[in-house]
Amino acid sequence: MTNNSSIDNQQQKGGNQLTPEQRKEELTKCILSQYRICAAGTIGGAGFSVLRSQSVRPTAWPMLGGAFVGTLGDFVYGYFVECASLRTGGDSLVGSNNDKKS
């Protein structure tokens, strides 16, 4: 879940009136507020470590690897999906570039 209350308030007051600096700041906040894929990777890695412990001495590397991959996934998901309206300046992603005919 993202914290876009300040963005929602500005959009209700009269459209998307963010300056480029404000948009960059809000995009950074939005991307850094993503955590779901990292949490899933950490839990999955911990589960893998526990299941693997019966045959090999357990280590923290699977959990750390899952957290790292999950963090990268969160950044990508946040940038392209969750925070896309900030990245594109308020335009919708669907068909925004395809509607322009040369």
Image (cartoon, rainbow, N blue to C red):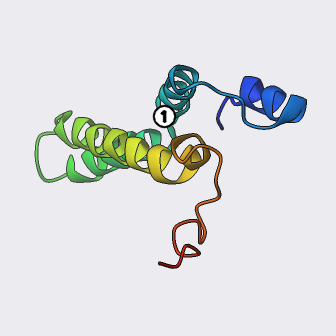
State the residue at coordinates (53%, 53%). 81
Occupied quadrant, residue 86: top right
Q: Which residue is mark 1?
A: 31
Disc 1 marks a residue whose amino acid type is Ile
Occupied quadrant, residue 79: top left
Inspect this view and state whether residue 47 appears: yes
Q: Is residue 19 left or right of residue 37?
A: right
Q: Quadrant of the N terminus?
A: top right
Query: What SS does tag 1 mark?
Result: helix
User: Callout 1: few (<14), some (14-19), or many (20+) C-alpha neighbours within 10 Å?
Assistant: many
Q: Residue furthest front?
A: 102
State the residue at coordinates (35%, 38%). 71
Q: Nearer the viewer, residue 38 or 26?
A: 26
* Vertical comparison of 44 with 71: above or below: below
Task: Pinpoint residue 67: horizontal percent, then vertical percent.
Answer: 32, 38
Label total for image? 1
Q: Nearer the viewer, residue 57 or 23?
A: 23
State the residue at coordinates (57%, 47%). 82
Task: Pinpoint residue 83: horizontal percent, then vertical percent.
Answer: 56, 43
Q: Is residue 87 left or right of residue 7?
A: left
Q: Is residue 32 left or right of residue 89?
A: left
Task: Pinpoint residue 57: horizontal percent, then vertical percent.
Answer: 11, 40
Q: Nearer the viewer, residue 57 or 96?
A: 96
Q: Nearer the viewer, residue 55 or 91?
A: 91
Q: Residue furthest left?
A: 56
Q: Residue furthest bottom?
A: 101
Task: Pinpoint residue 80: horizontal percent, then vertical percent.
Answer: 47, 52
Inspect this view and state whether residue 43 appears: no
